Amino acid sequence: MTFNGAFNLDETRHSYVYNPYYGQFDSTGGTVSKYHTRTYDYNLQQLVSYARSFGDNNFDILLGHEYYDYRYYELGASKSQMFSQGNKELDGAIIDGQGASSYKERRNNEGFFGRLQYNYDERIFGSASLRRDASSRFHPDHRWGTFWSVGGAWLINKESWFDASWVQELKLKASIGSQGNDNIGDFLYTDRFNIINSNNSLGTSFKSKGTKDITWETNTNFNIGAEFQLWNRVTGSIEYYRRKTSDMLFSFTVAPSLGYASYMDNVGNMVNSGVEMDFNVNIFDTRNFTWDVNVNISTLKNRITMLDPDKLITTEYTADGKGYKGYSNGSFFIGEDLSMFTWRLKEYAGVNEKGESLFYKNVKDEAGNITGRETTTNHAQADYYITEESSIPKVYGGFGTKLKVYGVDFGINFTYQIGGKQYDGTYAYFMSSPYGTAGYNYHKDLLNSWTPENTNTNIPRFQMNDQYSGAMSTRFLTNASFLNIQNINVATRYLPSGQESWPSTHCACICRQKMFSIGLNVKGSTHVSHTTRQPMLLSIHRCVPSPVVCHLSSKPNI
């Protein structure tokens, strides 16, 4: 029997003083603010385990209970017209800024679980688990969810009949299981209100709409694959995954006329599927020269398989007239048999004979049926179309290599993404026509704008206060495929005079974090220690995020 407990406490206090002589607070006579937060959480576990072996059969049973409690407290206040900037207390000022506020947050989770693990002669493995969890983020009637998993693995290379000396490991594995997600805000199951001052009288204002029936989002994951090691040089894995998300927790957008913009609800089901491959190859391995290469490839197919009938509130069309039922969510359309992040935009149609931006709109008959479409220069009159393009990539991953040659280490790693569309809002901003009296930066592509002498272009005229030249449309929907240098590492090792062992490794590093970029922004520093005569550090930094994907595989480690 085991008891585990973890406790965290974070206490933060701030004092801010804004001087009365210049800046935005010069008219207040100086302002002092006090700010205090406390974060407090603890996690308790009670575990009972039992292990027993019967010959080559080995069993391990675990039963447990877990409780997690999180609390957050915040208190702040401010006063102005200070006596002295040296007095940083609220009593050192005389005018109450009515900035006093405090609030607290609390949430907790509780779960009961059990797990059975089995292996036969360290060759055949099995695992099964069952959990029952509750979350305070749901209404008391819908707080509990049940989740489970079953998995197994077979080390084929350990079988007596297996005779392949060049195979060091060959493992087949499969698993299926479910897990719950409550990663939403607090108290979304009930209507929320703000307490306000209404002409020095107590008042309230509506904050958000609640949904009593929301409950756990459930992810059911199926994985099957193999891991291997060959010739003591090649390692890797190949795996197929299918992740079904049921009762998706999603913000459902409604008409502002209802008094609120959206509410959280379980809107439907979604499936992510694909193949993940990972390979590492040691090409050379000698005392003075080693060379390793690695590559990983992941494919992804994302589809919404079912929506709640109440969410099939509208039908939207592609440019060729294909209709989908669902609902819009900003610039995306949530519909059955579509990707979760399918773009819904007005379609750009080029420019007219005056250089004005053109957009498509539907033509309808007297019964309201769409009979075709035409162009318009008025962006507000244009219709939205489903692009059938998603922001989710079809293939993504990385690759790299590492060399060690006579005490010099070199490594470079790349990340890549193939497929997916992203809206380039920055490009749209710099391609917009000027307005007002201030000057702005513009993109060089504007040099190819329409003019009476340059009519063979789809870039609209560059004209003062042309409000539609940079309007949101498919014009700025761009291919999100990329190839990035994630990092470059160079390390040297040498023996200074009189030293018999290697010193610590020193390296130069280039890291990058930008999806679309040209050129390198490099900054570096180096210094030499006069006592050791060793170069201490050379660093060159550049930074780039991993591609946003929908699939996060979850499976037992078998």
Image (spheres, rainbow, N blue to C red):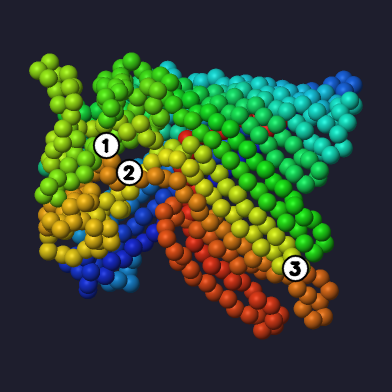
**SS assignment at label 1:** strand
Give the labeled residue for mark 1.
345
Q: Name the amino acid type tagged 2.
A: Leu
- Residues under labels 2 and 3: Cα distance? 48 Å
Number of numbered discs overlaid on the protein picture: 3
Is residue 386 found left or right of 72 in the rendered image?
Answer: left
Disc 2 to disc 1: CB gap under 8 Å: yes
Percent coordinates x, y for residue 506 in the rendering: 66, 69
Residue 77 lies in what quarter of the image?
bottom left
Percent coordinates x, y for residue 203 in the rendering: 18, 36
Q: Extreme bottom residue here?
A: 530
**SS assignment at label 2:** strand
Q: Name the amino acid type tagged 1.
A: Leu
Percent coordinates x, y for residue 248 in the rendering: 42, 25
Disc 2 to disc 3: CB gap under 8 Å: no
Task: Name the one closer to the observer, 378 or 136.
Answer: 378
Residue 192 lies in what quarter of the image?
top left
Task: Name the one closer to the observer, 96 or 418.
Answer: 418
Task: Name the one closer to the observer, 445 or 477.
Answer: 445
Residue located 63% across and 80% down the image: 528
Query: Which is in the foreground here, disc 2 or disc 3?
Result: 2
Q: Quadrant of the N terminus?
A: top right
User: Counting other residues with Cα less than 10 Å from the Cα at mark 1, is it few (<14), some (14-19), or many (20 or more)?
Assistant: many
Q: Looking at the picture, does residue 287 appear above or below residue 136? A: below
Is residue 384 found left or right of 540 in the rendered image?
Answer: left
User: Counting other residues with Cα less than 10 Å from the Cα at mark 2, is it few (<14), some (14-19), or many (20 or more)?
Assistant: some
Q: Quadrant of the C terminus?
A: top right
Percent coordinates x, y for residue 512 in the rendering: 50, 58
Give the labeled residue for mark 3.
407
Give the labeled residue for mark 2.
477
Confirm whether residue 70 shows in the render: no
